[in-house]
Amino acid sequence: MATRNSHQGGVEPSWDDLRHLESLDRLGSASAASRELGVAPSTIYRRITALEQAMGVVCYSQREGGVTRVGKELAELARKTKLSLSSIRQHAVESQESVGGRLTFTTLDGFAPLLTEPLAVLTRMHPKLEIVLDVSPTGSSIRKGEADIALTSVDQPPRQLVGRKLFTAECGVYGTREHAEDPERAPWVVLGPPLSASPLGRWEREQAQSTRIAVATSSRLTLNRLVAAGVGIGAIPHLLAAAHPELVEIESFREHAAKLQIPAWLLTHPDLRASAAVKAVFGVVGDALAALFPSKHDGRRARR
């Protein structure tokens, strides 16, 4: 073994070398240490020699009966460090697996009615989890980090996000029975800016050219309520229209409205996808919403 006491400098001691010294000190022999670490006995001595060269101290000496006093101090330090690292790792694993803390969830107001029951189930299952729900006509920007999870409508998610396509909602044109009897003279309720620039918003305005627009609103939820109140006719997803028994689908628009589809994705940031809380939301909320719109095309994953 090396007997140099002068530090060579420029070489950092290796944790792996310390691990070999700790095993030799604790087990008392190179053969026992080699079995524990799965290496040859000569490797034990070679790694301790490398440690001595890096530290500039003698860790093992046959004349002194094995591991030296300094070597034992280093071995004890290695044991404490190992326990500390193990404790840190266990804490990290427990934190990752624990479903708790606060998550910011943003969604379009048109999707909000669909979240009531799934969120009720989620919060009962995970009482330590707090969901900060942001509901607005356009939703907070998950791309700018304003939210942890987003339920939003996009054809394809941005490359910097990951997620799951939940469903594609099909629409129809609905109105009260009075408007359904004479739809050609009925006014329209349509999406206003900024949603008026969407494919659905443009389609609505094309249909309304032959009559008039009664109200243009940026809120999908408000549009549904206005149509149900008899203000005019409007394009509404079938499932959401079912919540208003006073609404009737106008059959004359059925063929034209068949192409109106609203894709919905549940998205998050790549660095959050391993979070237990995010996984819980994707599992409980995602599965519940996907079940509302069963389709062989849904359930796809976003590009990684």
Image: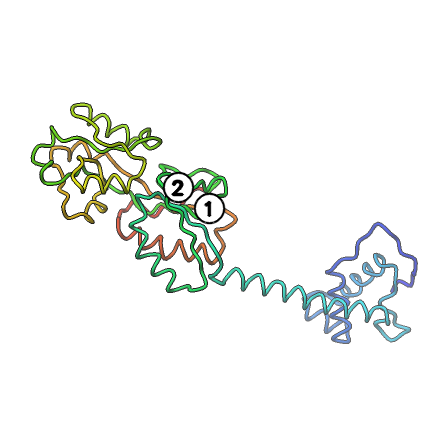
N-term mark: 2 or 1: 2
Closest to the observer: 255 or 13? 255
Closest to the observer: 165 or 41? 165
Q: Is residue 62 left or right of residue 273?
A: right
Q: Secondary structure at mark 1?
A: loop
Q: Is residue 264 left or right of residue 240?
A: right
Residue at the farthest left position = 181
Above-or-below relation of 31 to 103: below
Residue at figure coordinates x 85%, y 68% from the top left: 70
Image location (x, y in percent) of residue 155: 35, 36
Q: Amino acid at mark 1?
A: Ala
Q: Quick check: marks 2 and 1 in contact, CB under 8 Å?
A: yes
Q: Answer with the quarter of the image where residue 187 lies.
A: top left
Q: Amino acid at mark 2?
A: Gly
Closest to the observer: 297 or 17? 297
Disc 2 target residue: 139
Residue at figure coordinates x 16%, y 25% from the top left: 211
Q: Quote the CA–CA distance across marks 2 and 1.
A: 9 Å
Above-or-below relation of 28 to 176: below
Residue at figure coordinates x 81%, y 58% from the top left: 50
Disc 1 target residue: 147
Circle 2 residues within 10 Å: few <14, some 14–19, many ≥20: some
Q: Coloring scheme of the render?
A: rainbow
Image location (x, y in percent) of residue 304: 47, 43
Q: Secondary structure at mark 2?
A: loop
